[in-house]
Amino acid sequence: MDFQGFEQTEDEDLAVGFSSSLDTKFDVTVGHIEDIIMDDRFQEQQRNFLEKYYTEFDDSEENKFIYTDIHREYISLIENHLNEELCKRMSDFSMPEFSKQLYERKNELEGEIFEMLLTFSDFMTFKEMFLDYKAEKEGRTVDLSGGLTVRSLADGPGLNGESLSLFGQSFQEPQ
């Protein structure tokens, strides 16, 4: 490749450079965790756990003592499942080592997988997971899917006289 006029500085060389074997192993582990949590068996296990305990949770400042027991049970269940699956996929996997790396990188990480992993160490994230599930079960969530109409714009750059409806608001192409 020819990058005319592009000069790479020494700092950029380091940034582009090599990732450590620890970084690579961490990334591979996260990839396996993504596969595991997308698996139907994991989804069913987590859904069954949420179903079993969601009625215990209240959206209040005060936390009940039972929350601690539920959190411990959740950690044991999910961590054991992840550990078992990761050991099958990676012969040198170590949950304590991975947990340490996860903690060290907690400010760099984002996304659903890391939010799920935070439910192990961050009680408020765990509680929020239950409150979200409870709100969904009780029909207290907003379903935005009914207010969106999608029409093809493939026939040209405009709406071709068609209207676009978004949340009940109709938009038409100017004539």
Image (tube, rainbow, N blue to C red):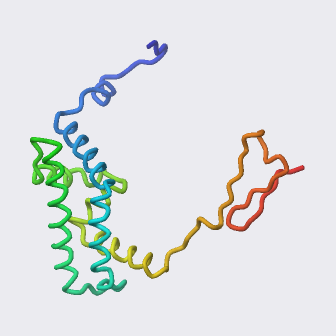
Please tell me in which quadrant of the rendered image residue 89 appears: top left
Residue 10 in the image: above or below residue 43: above
**Quarter in which the N terminus is drawn:** top left
Counting from the top left corner in percent of width and height, residue 163 is at 79, 56
Q: Is residue 82 left or right of residue 14?
A: left
Q: Which residue occupies the foreground of this view, 167 or 32?
A: 32
What residue is at 22 percent from the left and 45 percent from the top? 29
What residue is drawn where x is 82% and y is 51%? 173
**In terms of depth relative to the viewer, which is nearer, 27 or 161?**
161
| Residue 106 picture location, percent across and down | 26, 54
Task: Give the vertical position of 12 relative to 137 (above or below).
Answer: above
**Residue closest to the eye, 138 or 119:** 138
- Whole-percent x, y for residue 135 in the image: 43, 78
Q: How many marks?
A: 0
Across and down, in percent, residue 155 comes to 77, 40
Taking 159 as reference, is 6 left or right? Answer: left
31 vs 167, left or right, is left
Determine the image quadrant of residue 107. bottom left
What residue appears at the point 17 percent right and 49 percent down from the top-left corner?
Answer: 86
Residue in the image at 26% along x and 50% along y = 33
